[in-house]
Structure formats: C-alpha cells, structure tokens
Amino acid sequence: MNKSGHVLNGALLAVGLGVILAVDPTAGPILTGPDGTVTAESVAAVAGDVGVSVAKLSLPIVLGALFPDVDTAFGRHRKTLHSLPVLGIFLAFPFLFGNLQYVWIGVATHYFLDMVGSKRGIALFHPLSDTEYSLPTGVATSSAWATRVTLLITAVELVVLGAIHYYAFALDTSLADATTAIGI
C-alpha cells in the first residue's frame, strides 16, 4: 500500500479501536438513563468516553502505521523496517519502558496491509532472509482498487482486534496487570 493508504488505515483503526475500548457490550444498554430512556447526558458520556479513547490511540497507532516506511529514506524498502524483529522491538518496548503501548498495533497492521493488500509483500525475516511474503489478494498501489482493499482490510483488522479484546484479553489492560495475569 501507499502512504495515504497507511494513514487511512491508521486513522480508521484509531477510531474503531477507540470505540471498541470505550464501549463495553456486556454492560447492557449504554445510552439509556435509569428509567430506560435515552438521555442527552448518557449520549454525551458515551461520546466523551469514545472521544478520549480515540484521542489516546490516534497518535501512537498512526505513527506505528507510518513507521515501517521510514525505510524508504534509508536501507531497503519493505525489508529493513518491515520484518518480525522490528515488530518484536515494538512489542517489547511497553514491557521494558512502560510506554508506546499501542504503537505495535500500527506497525503490525502496516505489515498486514502490505502483505495482504499489495502485490509485492514484505521481507518478514529480514535480515536473515530477503524473501518477500504476500498473499494473492494484493493490488498495485496505484490501482483504483487500492482504497477499497485498504478499507476491507481495516474492517477485518477491527473485527479481529474486537474479538481479541472482548473474548481473549482486554487490549487496554495495564502492563502491570497483564504481566501479573500471565505470571511474569
């Protein structure tokens, strides 16, 4: 995908994930007051929670979605910063330093978009191997279909992230609670 596709993907992921993290579907009706009617206060409260969540996620996810393409300025594009070792660094960063918690989501979805949405693929195992991996679903970055493919992939990513958040583990779990839960 091209840079505008990655920006679109990152922005939509930040909004979608902001909604996923702010709205608890197990809490029952979220827009109704105590008497069961929709109130302006309840709508404002949910909108405020979603707005804060989206604001919190926007910068780290969009930066993460753009970071792998820094290798267009140095190294080899879709190799130097498009590999699993680089993703591993972003996954480890929150555990080691307590920040950049959501940047890995942008980086991972950048990889997914390049593998599924473009013809060329990425070198997942660089520097050990320069073999580029992709799926046969990709389109040329200049194709009229590129934006549609980006939107479809973003929707799939949000469904997967929502499923993980609601059924596996909460994506907004603090690092202290997460490490305690897994016994580290």
Image: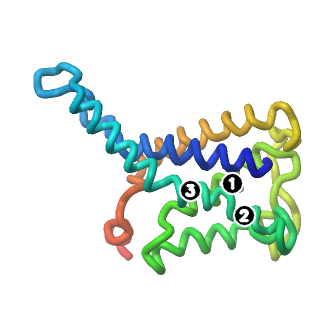
Marker count (numbered): 3
Horizontal side of residue 115 vs 175, given as left or right: right
Q: Which mark is in front, 1 or 3? A: 3
Task: Mark 1 and mark 2 in contact? Answer it, CB < 8 Å.
Answer: yes
The location of residue 176, given as percent across then percent down, is 33, 71
Mark number for residue 61? 3
Mark number for residue 110? 1
Q: Secondary structure at mark 3?
A: helix
In this figure, which residue is indicated by the disc labeled 2? 68
x 50%, y 68%: residue: 100
Distance from Cα at disc 3 to Cα at disc 2: 12 Å
Which colour scheme appears in the figure? rainbow
Q: Secondary structure at mark 2?
A: helix
Distance from Cα at disc 1 to Cα at disc 3: 10 Å
Q: Secondary structure at mark 1?
A: helix
The location of residue 39, given as percent across then percent down, is 21, 25
Q: Residues within 10 Å of mark 2 (few under 14, many from 20)?
A: many
The location of residue 24, given as percent across then percent down, is 32, 40
Task: Please state which amino acid type lies under the numbered disc 1.
Answer: His
Mark before the other along the chain sequence, 1 or 2: 2
